[in-house]
Amino acid sequence: MPVTLSNRIPDIASRHDSRGDDLHDRDPRRRLIVALDVSTAAAAQKIVAAVGDSALTYKVGMQLYTAEGPQVVRDLVTSGRRVFLDLKYHDIPNTVGSAVSEAAKLGVSMLTVHASGSAKMLRAAADAAQARPGLMVLAVTVLTSMDGSDLETIGMQGTVAESVVRLARIALASGCQGIVTSAREASKVRTELGHEFAILTPGVRPAGGSVGDQKRVVTPAEAIAAGASHIVVGRPITDAADPASAARAILGQMGG
Ligand code: C5P
């Protein structure tokens, strides 16, 4: 059964996307990304409807995309939401470029590639993304599940922070609009590489909320203070009794 999102947000997403400038827009809904970590379009639709216009941008990751395919993305875009397609592409440059072209046709606003895929792969992604003005290619630096000993095992030298900065530098030099990293490394990245690019951080929990299975978490305010331009929040919103008010509370804690 096709999924339709009846509570369309008509103007906000298109107005924002036509400007294509997340970094200078003060609407925090452009910087809060709600993770739709569910297995069905129906479950995703229920969350989006419950959040209403308290959030604008939704993450479709590998779970939902693998289960439901591109139609779930098309439906979100058609309903006026912005989509962050978090499939973390990592393949030869030609294949990644082709995948990014398809994502651009779907109308996504942001997508991820692995920075460790090399400058050539990142450049292919960035070039393909130009088909859709405002589409941001974000490079995943070091997964938040990895620590220094994991990096050493796969032959990456230096600390996690050093690897994050090294990978971020390659990504930005290759045309990416930003990176994904934990808030722990964000401030070092800002100090070393500046402010004119996006830093998206997961692992965020509202002040006073439960930490759940997360070991290292930051509040929205801490993430922004560390240099994050965007935060990804899943369960604190999607599992809340009132997802709209949970999202609004987080927006309030982000400032701006
Ligand atoms: O924990 P939460 O439900 O807020 O997670 C939201 C998203 O952030 C998930 O889709 C997960 O993939 C990502 N995440 C992450 N690193 C963490 C915690 C969550 O990448 N430490």
Image: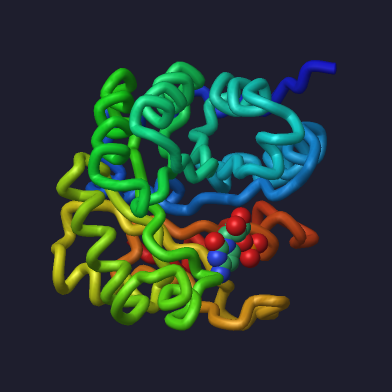
Give the residue at x 75% y 61%: 240
Residue at x-position 66% and y-position 21%: 71
**196 versus 134 height, above or below:** below
Q: Position of residue 27 (x, y in %)?
A: 37, 48
Q: Residue 109's image quarter?
A: top left
Q: Residue at x 43, y 73 (%)?
A: 151
Q: Position of residue 116 (x, y in %)?
A: 36, 54
Q: Is residue 233 visible?
A: no
Tell me: 5 left or right of 129. Answer: right
Position of the C terminus by quadrant: bottom left
Quadrant of res 136: top left
Task: Tell me if residue 48 comes above or below residue 183 in the rendering.
Answer: above
Tell me the quadrant of ligand 1. Answer: bottom right
> In the image, residue 75 lies at what x, y percent?
64, 22
* Picture layout, residue 183 above or below residue 55: below
Q: Horizontal and vertical percent for residue 161?
A: 31, 76
Q: Residue 117, can we see it?
A: yes
Q: Is residue 156 left or right of residue 1?
A: left
| Residue 217, quarter of picture | bottom right
- 165 vs 78, nearest the viewer: 165
